[in-house]
Amino acid sequence: MDRLIYTAMTGASQMLNRQAAVAHNLANVNSTGYRAEEHQLRAVQVQSTAQQKGLATRALTVDASTHTNYSSGPMITTGRALDMAVQGSGWIALQLPDGSEAYTRNGSLELNVLGIVQTRSGLTVQGDGGPINIPPEQKISVGNDGTISTLPESGVQNTVSIIGRVKLVNPPASDLVRGEDGLFRLRDGSAAPVDEGVKVATGTLEGSNVNPAEQMVAMISLARQFEMQLKLLSTADANDRAATQILSLR
């Protein structure tokens, strides 16, 4: 009887975790550069510490791994100078407050009051020599390799100055981990090298790669699986009561 309870109980628990992941994906359908999160489950046998272990008949359902869907999202044209979308595989490097690096596909950038290029959430964009500082009263343009150039809005307007270059990287997907802030980092905490092959499309943003219809179907399927696990628990309880009643009559 307890074998059924083990399987149903842990199965129901993991269904709730997967529902939370699907709900998080649906909440980020419109988040720029978001990568869908997926969970993979597997069965693990319960290990006994007793000397007479008996048969390995009990199993738990566990979350084997958290998988990220790295496929590209749709491209959305904005026409804004500091909007950029990574074409194909690759990432935009950010400098965190603690000095470490993180990576994002969200290329919606802006200037702070000091003229430093940063994300909408206030994180500094990593340049080839540190933060990128844009002088005031300058018209900004970005090349497909991430190079930021400026042109004066007044005075002599034919002098183009290269201010810096956004650091673009492309580490192996297996080396990346997603943080609680939604940004990606290397597993060993190091900084990825610049990849000259990564290109960006300017005046464009990459949308989320979440398929809302697919996620809705997954949510309905997970809800039905959860109900099935609860019915199994109810069945196990009913069987236990019936067995107890038969034994008490004897």
Image (cartoon, rainbow, N blue to C red):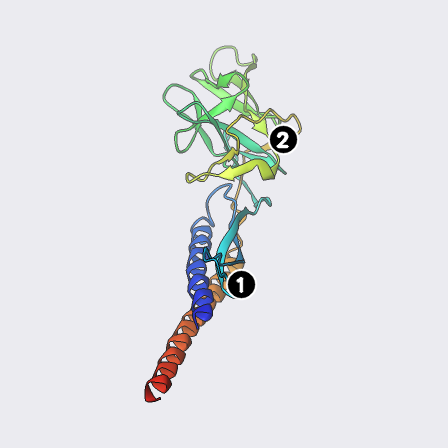
Residue at 60% in and 24% down: 194
The residue pinned by badge 2 equals: 199
Vertical side of 179 occupied by 225: above or below? below
Q: Position of residue 137 (x, y in %)?
A: 43, 17
Q: Position of residue 95 (x, y in %)?
A: 46, 25
* Mark 2: amino acid: Lys
Closer to viewer: mark 1 or mark 2: 1
Residue at 39% in and 24% down: 112
The quarter of the rendered structure image containing the N terminus is bottom left
Which one is nearer the viewer's eye here, 80 or 199? 199
**Element under label 1?**
loop
The residue pinned by badge 1 equals: 56
Give how far apart the Cα atoms at labels 1 and 2 are: 53 Å
**Element under label 2?**
strand
* Mark 1: amino acid: Ala
Residue 86 horizontal side relative to residue 6, left or right: right
Extreme residue toward the top, this view: 156
The answer to whether residue 38 is seen in the rendering is no
Q: Quadrant of residue 201?
A: top right
Vertical side of 4 occupied by 179: above or below? above
Extreme residue toward the bottom, this view: 249
Extreme residue toward the right, this view: 197
The answer to whether residue 153 is seen in the rendering is yes
Whichever of labels 1 and 2 marks the residue nearer the N terminus, that label is 1
Asked if marks 1 and 2 touch (Cβ < 8 Å), the reply is: no
Vertical side of 162 occupied by 92: above or below? below
Extreme residue toward the front, this view: 51
Residue 31 horizontal side relative to residue 174, left or right: left
Q: Position of residue 98 (x, y in %)?
A: 40, 24
